[in-house]
């Protein structure tokens, strides 16, 4: 009950100035525009480790998927089912379902699976990416135990401008990719259009280590193709009012290649998504109001002639949110709101159309007592037609301890993950009695020399999370797999990050390194036959991950070297089987040519430079060395 009172306190505290402002006439207060337009995570994720990937990094390889970009620029583990296959994120020792993906503030995880396939989301669709490690602030939603991936666009600028970009890339294994964008703006309207296309045969060769003779085999039936369109508008209807709207359509067709243990495959899968949103934002004195609505549809068709399977899946999501933000002064900001979502799933494997209604109340306060110090507290209450998870509070802070040279950060809170529709309703195997997974998480760290022009920036974070009611699919006595809340899991580890930029003459060097150490183990289980898996690392969560890069800029040339290392990955719960550790490296060489307002960039990439043979998921081969080359053309007019 005390948590509920806390929620009411945050909200009522801010409503008092609202009532006063209605009764009194006051001049418009000029506030920092970054706060008015900023997402909630910028205000309420203080004390949380955040990895940022900006537009300049994205532009170095504009045809990379989100999965490939995160693999190269963070220490997060990407579970990839092979080239062209599904790829999902595993952060801080969690499963894919424990990680959120937000687009324009909306959670785009599948309601049926509880996750997003990052292999079909091109990085080209966004201007910048933020990866919030651990459970994000409750004001951003609370289904994330591992991380929240936020896809953002730059703040609209209402001034006359025209920008266009055209890119084409080709490479090994029948790889052809292209994308184009056009941005227009004047003092009342901004418009951004992005289109993309890709196709690849994925007919690479690999060593089949499952065969006693270890022959070299060419992958078959692995082609993938797709295209998409994004359109965003923002209208400035007054000096303090904005309307934004957007649409994202994407289609992907892929062949499902055989496992290394199977001679052939004829399965195919087609995915199409349609996402639309509409936002209205207004600033009145010290108050900012935002109303958002979104409608998403996902359709998937799977066919396997050999198994006589012909399946289609349809999920629709309806989303709405009202948010209020109060800027008391430069030190205190209060944010509260309510959101509602309705997910409807029509699957043959469900006995009927299933739906989930979710109503959420959230509130938070951000306090900046003086320069360099930030405190925040927030909480979320969520109600569904399935079950009501616990109220989730969170507190965090960051403090400048030594004149911008040393920062201390810390965060603590409760987060949860509601069972997916497949967990609850899949026939056979679904378990309608599953409980919500609940985590009590803490993290603390230090940041050295942030923004220093001479010394490198270091950050190290330690984290600990205890998760109750961990959901695990396992075989039953009848041989059918079914999920159950059998386990308590403890997750602990360390994340370290270093970045440094040095210029000398015409040469600029940028170095980045990321390391993560994750221990994720079952510490208790209600299953009497679980003794063999207690205190064992959870399958497909490597303990060690390293990602590093070095960029050399000289005149208009750029040379980039990226190195990744993934430690041993266990494939069984008793840790008796594993995949070997592996290291991969990529090299990119590019040349910029500037002609007045036109910029041309030529680039050449070598991926998996040392031709490493490896698997991320068992019996799913990954390609060896391959190359690609491309050209990007930019035209800017202001």
Image (cartoon, rainbow, N blue to C red):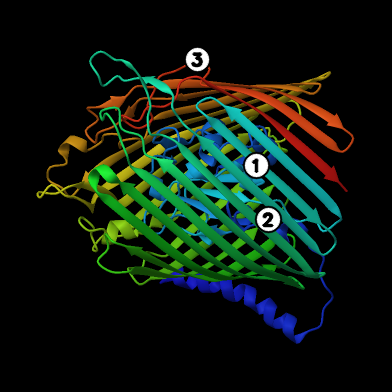
In the image: residue 473, left or right of residue 531: right
Determine whether label 2 and label 1 are within 8 Å by CB: no
**Which quadrant of the rendered structure holds the N terminus?**
bottom left
Indicate which label's residue lies in the foreground, 3 or 2: 3
Residue picked out by circle 1:
179
Regarding mark 1 in the picture, which secondary structure is present there?
strand
Q: For the point 73% across and 32% down, which residue is it? A: 452
The tag earlier along the polypeptide, 3 or 2, is 2
- Residue 215 location in percent, x, y? 31, 15
From mark 3 to mark 1, how far is it between C-alphas?
A: 29 Å
Q: Residue furthest bottom?
A: 23
Q: Which residue is mark 3?
A: 610
At a point 68% along the width and 78% down the height, the residue shown is 18
> Under tag 3, what secondary structure?
loop
Which callout, 2 or 1, points to the residue nearer the camera? 1
Q: At which x and y percent is residue 611? A: 47, 16
């Amino acid at each position: 009950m005390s948590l509920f009172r806390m929620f009411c306190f945050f909200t009522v505290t801010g409503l008092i100035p609202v009532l006063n402002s209605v009764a009194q006439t006051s001049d418009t207060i000029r506030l920092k525009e970054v706060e008015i337009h900023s997402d909630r995570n910028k205000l309420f994720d203080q004390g949380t480790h955040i990895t940022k990937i900006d537009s300049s990094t994205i532009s170095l390889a504009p045809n990379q998927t989100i999965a490939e970009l995160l693999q190269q620029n963070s220490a997060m583990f990407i579970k990839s089912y092979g080239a062209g296959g599904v790829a999902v994120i595993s952060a801080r020792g969690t499963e894919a379902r424990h990680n959120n993906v937000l687009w324009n503030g909306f959670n785009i995880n599948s309601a049926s699976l509880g996750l997003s396939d990052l292999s079909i989301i091109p990085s080209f669709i966004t201007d910048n990416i933020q990866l919030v490690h651990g459970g994000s602030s409750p004001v951003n939603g609370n289904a994330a135990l591992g991380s929240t991936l936020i896809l953002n666009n730059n703040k609209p600028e209402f001034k006359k401008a025209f920008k266009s970009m055209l890119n084409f890339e080709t490479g090994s294994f029948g790889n052809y990719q292209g994308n184009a964008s056009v941005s227009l703006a004047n003092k009342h309207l901004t418009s951004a259009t992005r289109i993309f296309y890709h196709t690849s045969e994925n007919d690479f060769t690999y060593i089949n280590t499952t065969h006693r003779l270890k022959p070299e085999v060419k992958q078959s039936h692995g082609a993938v193709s797709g295209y998409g369109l994004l359109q965003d508008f923002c209208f400035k209807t007054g000096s303090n009012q904005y309307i934004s709207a957007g649409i994202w359509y994407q289609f992907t067709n892929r062949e499902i290649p055989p496992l290394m243990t199977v001679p052939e495959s004829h399965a195919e899968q087609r995915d199409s998504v349609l996402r639309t949103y509409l936002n209205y934002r207004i600033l009145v004195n010290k108050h900012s109001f935002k109303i958002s609505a979104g409608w998403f549809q996902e359709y998937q068709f799977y066919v396997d002639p050999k198994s006589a399977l012909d399946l289609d899946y349809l999920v629709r999501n309806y989303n709405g949110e009202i948010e209020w933000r109060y800027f008391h002064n430069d030190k205190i900001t209060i944010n509260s709101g309510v959101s509602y979502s309705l997910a409807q799933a029509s699957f043959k494997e469900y006995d009927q159309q299933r739906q989930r209604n979710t109503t959420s109340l959230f509130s938070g306060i951000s306090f900046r007592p003086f320069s360099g110090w930030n405190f925040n507290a927030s909480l979320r209450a969520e109600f569904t037609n399935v079950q009501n998870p616990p109220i989730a509070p969170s507190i965090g802070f960051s403090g400048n301890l030594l004149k911008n040279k040393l920062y201390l950060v810390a965060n603590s809170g409760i987060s949860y993950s509601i069972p997916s529709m497949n967990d609850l309703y899949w026939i056979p195997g679904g378990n309608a009695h599953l409980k919500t997974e609940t985590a009590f998480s803490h993290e603390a760290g230090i940041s050295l020399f942030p923004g220093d022009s001479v010394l490198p920036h270091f950050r190290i974070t330690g984290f600990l999370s205890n998760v109750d009611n961990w959901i695990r699919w396992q075989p039953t006595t009848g041989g059918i797999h079914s999920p159950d809340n059998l386990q308590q899991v403890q997750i602990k580890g360390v994340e370290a990050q270093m970045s440094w930029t040095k210029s000398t003459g015409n040469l600029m060097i940028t170095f980045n390194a990321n390391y993560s150490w994750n221990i994720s183990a079952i510490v208790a289980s209600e299953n009497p036959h679980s003794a063999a898996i207690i205190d064992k690392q959870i399958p497909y969560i490597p303990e060690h991950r390293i990602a590093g890069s070095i960029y050399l800029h000289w005149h208009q040339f750029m040379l980039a070297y990226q190195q990744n290392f993934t430690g041993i990955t266990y494939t069984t719960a008793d840790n008796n089987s594993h995949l070997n550790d592996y290291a991969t490296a990529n090299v990119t060489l590019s040349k910029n040519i500037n002609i007045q307002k036109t910029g041309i960039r030529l680039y050449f990439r070598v991926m998996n430079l040392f031709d490493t043979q490896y698997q991320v998921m068992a019996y799913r081969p990954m390609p060896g060395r391959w190359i690609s080359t491309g050209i990007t053309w930019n035209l800017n007019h202001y």
